[in-house]
Image (cartoon, rainbow, N blue to C red):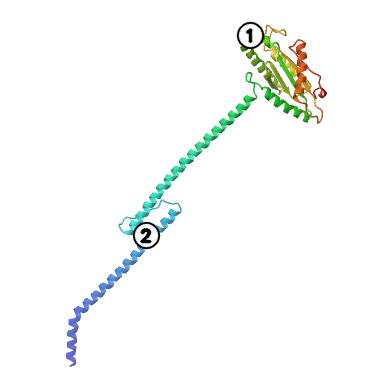
Amino acid sequence: MTGWRVVVIGEQVEILEPLIRSRAFTTTFVLIVVLLVVITGIWLSGFFLRSIVAMSALMRRAAQGDLSGRLEAGGTDEIDSLKRNINEMLDSLTQAFDARSELTRKLQHANSSLEEKVRERTLELEQANRWLEQQALLDGLTGIANRKQFTETSQRMLDRSAEEGAELVLLLLDIDYFKRYNDTYGHVMGDECLKNVAGALQQEAEKHGALVARLGGEEFAVIAAMTEDGAVSLAGHLVERVRSLQIPHRDSKAAPYVTVSCGGVIYLPEAAQVAPPLETLIQAADEALYKVKSSGRNHYLFGDRGPSQVT
């Protein structure tokens, strides 16, 4: 009985052996497939993770202003499609930023050019204003100071002289027989005579630090801060300088050439004295000039000196 059963079992094993081998193969195959799936999954998850990390890093750089990076996207799957979209977005942003940078550069250049033009126009305007201010203070014919500048400057000098106790000289000068000169030589030559006399007076006055102005017609004025001796020297030099021009004047009773008469006044302030009106000094100098004209012209004369005569 026992031997028969063994034989029978052996026959069953032999009959089932192909089936057993088939199941083992299937199991092995399934295990291999599962292993491949797991490995593929791990690889795919690693691939996706790397892609996500790369995209995250790229976007972080882009957020910080660095748009130079790009993702590799050679495939056709969704990840590569997403990468290409990100690359295209970065390309668009780069173009936009480049366009903005170019526009900013152009705006800065335009702004710089505008600022330069504004500076140029401002400088031109300042120069024009200075020129206008100068013209408002200059005599149109002779180019020396006019009455307005003389009045403003003289009053300042007079106030300072009274405050500091410094001596001041005021001279008035007339071209002798100038009406006869105009009648004889004409107004054009008369204007030339005025310009030549004014130029000579100014050159001489500048040597002494004095201001010379044309008050009108043939009348001139000179003012300077100086001592009595300096004032007398200045008056003599001015009269002599005009004589040295040797401008012919055949109808002058003073000389055969153009001359000037000069009347002056010297202001000698006392300590803490209030300055007298400028008109007071002018009147005193005009009285001295009248005396010169009455005594033959072509020389200079000072009126009574001292503060008591001009206050």
Q: How far apart in space, not on screen, are marks 2 and 1 (Cα)?
A: 106 Å
What residue sits 71% from the left and 20% below the top?
A: 221
Based on the displayed image, in which of its 4 quarters is residue 298 positioned? top right
For the N terminus, which image quadrant?
bottom left
Dot 2: few (<14), some (14–19), or many (≥20) neighbours within 10 Å? some
Q: Relative to the observer, which residue lies in front, 1 or 58?
A: 58
Q: Residue furthest right?
A: 308
Based on the displayed image, in which of its 4 quarters is residue 224 positioned? top right
For the C terminus, which image quadrant?
top right
Name the front one of labels 2 and 1.
1
For the residue marked with disc 1, what is the amino acid? Tyr
What residue sits 42% from the left and 56% below the top?
A: 59
> Which residue was labeled with disc 2?
51
Q: Is residue 60 above or below residue 185?
A: below
List x then y, in percent, for residue 136. Answer: 63, 25
Based on the displayed image, in which of its 4 quarters is residue 197 positioned? top right
